[in-house]
Amino acid sequence: MIDPMVPLTLRLFVLGQALMQHDLRAESWPYFAALAAMFAPVDLCFTDLETAIRSPSAEPPTREGVFLHVATPPVLDYLKDLSISLLATANNHIWDLGTGGITGTLDELDARGFTHAGAGSNLAEAAAPAYRPTANGIVALVAAASGAIREGAAATATRAGVNGLRREMSGILNADDVVRICNAITTTTFSKRVADKPRNGSGSSRGSASMPARRSMSATARRGCRGSSSIADGRSFTTSAI
């Protein structure tokens, strides 16, 4: 049980997008060992999974040629061996194998214990925070995608997809999307049930904005709710970006 009165430091590595199609371990990539050693001591490593994973649920590709980004499940094992455990799945490539490809990718992530947010079997799931407990506190992730989200890729109440942040023809962000994303961030909660009921990843939980709040934790919301956010549970945390 973490004592909220004891100051802790949560160490987080924030990486650029993982737009990968091959398991680099099979190619004796010379930098793997050095990166694995760098990432292993920290509490969490985060990246954006910018590819669809082949699975039995995958559908025919929705792109062609160099614009199609698809990987086999061993790529996820490679990321796990790098100690990456926190993933955003809200992007314009997770739909490269259709709606079934999204659900199949999420199944592959769950099977390997990743904590992920930004896509789901419906809009409520795609928009919900994902939680991951660490030795130095609980972290929540809210993820959304704006820009090149194609027709059919965004989640709806009855369709799997991405948590989209649409922009109107006027250039103004869609009001409903902004409210949904800000609600997910500002009502992020950390309660005993998060640790007691793992649903997404190793000891992690995929929450919902309606969970009874113990305290609101979003630094991003205090700045005006801008974009995606990874959130620590009220304690100090340090980040390193690559």
Image: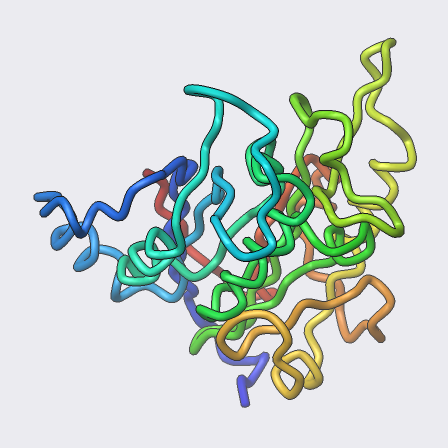
Q: Which of 118 and 210 is in front in this view?
A: 118
Q: In which quarter of the image is the C terminus?
A: top left
Q: Nearer the viewer, residue 52 or 164?
A: 52
Q: Is residue 218 visible?
A: yes
Relative to 126, does residue 209 appear above or below in the rendering?
below
Instruction: Locate residue 162 relative to residue 93 in the image: left or right.
Output: right
Q: Give the residue displayed 75% in from the left and 69% down from the top.
A: 215
Q: Give the residue displayed 48% in from the left and 39% down from the top.
A: 51
Q: Is residue 219 visible?
A: no
- State the image coordinates of residue 174 (x, y, percent, origin top left): 87, 27
In the figure, residue 145 lies in which quadrant? top right
Instruction: Locate residue 184 relative to residue 100 in the image: left or right.
Output: right
In the figure, residue 36 lies in which quadrant? bottom left
- The chosen color scheme is rainbow
- State the image coordinates of residue 213 (x, y, percent, origin top left): 81, 72
Q: Nearer the viewer, residue 15 or 59?
A: 59
In the figure, residue 214 lies in which quadrant? bottom right
Instruction: Locate residue 1 relative to residue 152 in the image: left or right.
Output: left
Q: In which quarter of the image is the N terminus?
A: bottom right
Q: Give the residue displayed 77% in from the left and 33% down from the top.
A: 152
Q: Which of 164 and 218 is in front in this view?
A: 164
